[in-house]
Image (spheres, rainbow, N blue to C red):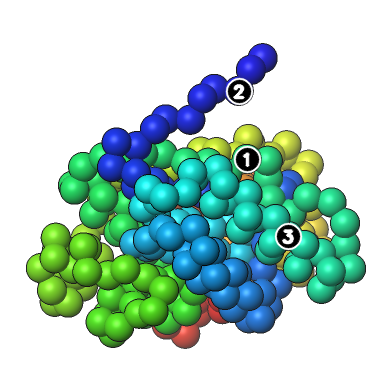
Amino acid sequence: MPRKPRAISESNIYHVVIRGADRQQMFEEKNDYDKYLDILSYYKKECQFEIYAYCLMSNHVHLLIHTSNTPLATVFRRINTRYAVWFNMKYDRTGFLQQGRYYSEPVNDERYLLTVVRYIHQNPYKTGIEAFPGESYPWSSIYSYLSGNSALVDIGLINNLIGGSKAFTTFHRETEEADCLDIHKLTKRLPDDVAKELIIKETGCHTITDFQSLPLLEKKKHLALLHEQGISIRQLNRLTGTSKGIIQRTLTEGMPHNSKPQP
């Protein structure tokens, strides 16, 4: 079956998601994140595109870019290839790093543009890595806006639309069920046996029963990261015995300062 053609943006603005092949990590340590941003900066100049927002998560990347001089496919072929070659050489591995083609959606109006900016910046918060957007996660463009200074991110358009730093902070504390490109919606459901192995691997427990026996606060430290790795809320509920309500609140409210997982 032929691939469905990509939707074209009238504004040349796109929300792009790149994910690791087979849910593997795209970033193992700080230097990997730094390298990706260096490559992004290089091709921003080379291909003449603008970046309005980004967030680098452990196994996927969100980018909001405006490109009118270089086709989107060319931009991400260059970025993905260069980073994959560097990553494979560093870790002495072979094969694909990214999962097939990148995903993209057009952004054609100002309201949705702001929705996507907030959605991208709220990724670490919604997965429980930080207690509120902009609190501590370093691999996001939100700090370019909060500081008012960035060589990589083009902050002028979004700042003008939102109305300054105070309005920007208030806007990012709001929540909305936005129908943006979602890494979990793009990922097929994991088989239960694979999900169980992932729970054991990520939590350090010897069995699922061990995880079920953990205190609730200890469970919460792991739930957001397990969900990020592709385990659905329904699976987490069924396999770990944790109620859906607790899982959903953990994913949407973030973790306390002294118990959130480290990036």
Decide: few, some or many residues near mark 1? Use Cα within 10 Å; few <14, some 14-19, many ≥20. Answer: few
Residue at 70% of width from left, 55% of height from top? 81
Locate the C terminus and report the quarter of the image it occupies: bottom right
Residue that mark 1 sits on: 101
Who is closer to the viewer here, 249 or 57?
57
Q: Which amino acid does label 1 sit on?
A: Arg
Decide: few, some or many residues near mark 3? Use Cα within 10 Å; few <14, some 14-19, many ≥20. Answer: many
Residue 34 appears left or right of 178? right
Residue at 47% of width from left, 85% of height from top? 258
| Mark 1 / mark 2, whichever is N-terminal | 2
From the top left corner, tell me how far across and down residue 202 is, in percent. Answer: 71, 64
Decide: few, some or many residues near mark 2? Use Cα within 10 Å; few <14, some 14-19, many ≥20. Answer: few
Looking at the image, how many numbered discs can be counted on the residues? 3
Q: Which amino acid does label 2 sit on?
A: Arg
> Which numbered tag is attached to residue 84?
3
Q: Do the residues labelled 1 and 2 touch (CB within 8 Å)?
A: yes
Residue at 69% of width from left, 62% of height from top? 82
Who is closer to the viewer here, 198 or 6?
6
Residue at 28% of width from left, 75% of height from top? 145
Q: What element carries label 1?
A: loop
Location of residue 158 by image quarter = bottom left
